[in-house]
Amino acid sequence: MPVVAAHLYAHGKRVRSVSIDERIDYPGDKSQFVWIGLLDPTADELRILQEGYGLHPLAVEDAAKGDQLPKLDVYSDQLFIVARPAALEDGQIRYGETSIFVGHSHIISVRRTSLRGYTALRQQLEAAPALLKHGVDYVLHAILDYIVDGYLPLGEALEEEVLGMEQRTLDHFLTRSEINRIFEIRRQLIRFQRVLAPTADVVAKLTRLDLPSIDLETRPYFSDVLDHVRRVQAMVDGLREVLSSVFEFSNLLEQQRTGVITRQLAAWAAILAVPTAVAGIYGMNFDYMPELKSVWGYPAVLLVNAVICTGLFVRFKRAHWI
């Protein structure tokens, strides 16, 4: 069912349900308005709303087409806002899209994909009639605030994953899958920033500009939403820096560990080279060689090998090569 909810509100309370082809207008009373919520509507349903509420054709086209970046357009006495809800699913950031038509006596939200419905938000607002009676601009603020608040747990979940990677880097080399995950998260954060920046721009316009259907009293609410967006932006910027530092730190640790292993191998190779060299000399087929006929020749050679190898071991140990 494309129409999720469509109700008439008066003085902060729900009065009755309305149909999308029912034209309702209260130009002199801001506290009476219609809030229509649709999910993946058809072109015919959008056309009915366009004719009934005088929606601009370009705005309707954008709402029907979808895949828009957050934006705010002004058409005469109406506003058209596009917002992008987001949620983390199976380690991936999934995006929805909400198009919002705002007039003096109506607010129409068109949602693409089933990502985070607004039923709970509607119930929350209906439970606070003192706020809902302010009109469509307060409902617009509530929708945008609801969308932006969904960004924070997403960022916190990625933050926990990134910090876990940072800790694991201290213990072992990063695996190929972990390196792939680092670059995957980095790509997702870059795309997320492309959503956050225009979202902040939209909310900033609602905070500072003189726009139709937006009263001065509502601007502090939008300013609060803007603060939330900037907080998420700062978190994303910080995560990108941590990801870069994790990768660089992992490379440094890998080089350091490789250097330690190389020194250890070189030290043991030098120690083993002594008996190898002595054995190589005495393995030559000559009749006249030192100590060949001596009873103490063999023990003496072993003792010399042991002394030299022990000396090398002690020296390498002091140099922290072993």
Image: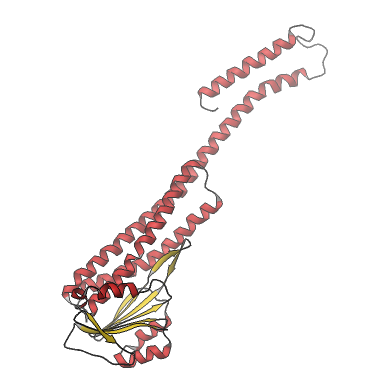
Q: Position of residue 220 (x, y in %)?
A: 19, 69
Q: Position of residue 299 (x, y in %)?
A: 71, 11
Please give the name of the residue rendered at 22% of the width and 73% of the height, measured from the top-left corner. 128
Please give the name of the residue rendered at 19% of the width and 78% of the height, measured from the top-left corner. 133
Quadrant in which the C terminus appears = top right
Q: Position of residue 269 (x, y in %)?
A: 63, 28
Please give the name of the residue rendered at 44% of the width and 47% of the height, measured from the top-left corner. 166
Please give the name of the residue rendered at 76% of the width and 17% of the height, measured from the top-left corner. 282
Image quadrant where residue 300 sits: top right
Image quadrant where residue 44 sits: bottom left
Q: Position of residue 257 (x, y in %)?
A: 52, 38
Query: Looking at the picture, does residue 321 appear above or below residue 177?
Result: above
Residue toward you, 303 or 165: 165
In the figure, is residue 284 to the left or right of 245?
right
- Is residue 201 among the parts visible in the rendering? no
Quadrant in which the N terminus appears = bottom left
In the figure, is residue 162 to the left or right of 79?
right
- Is residue 291 among the parts visible in the rendering? yes
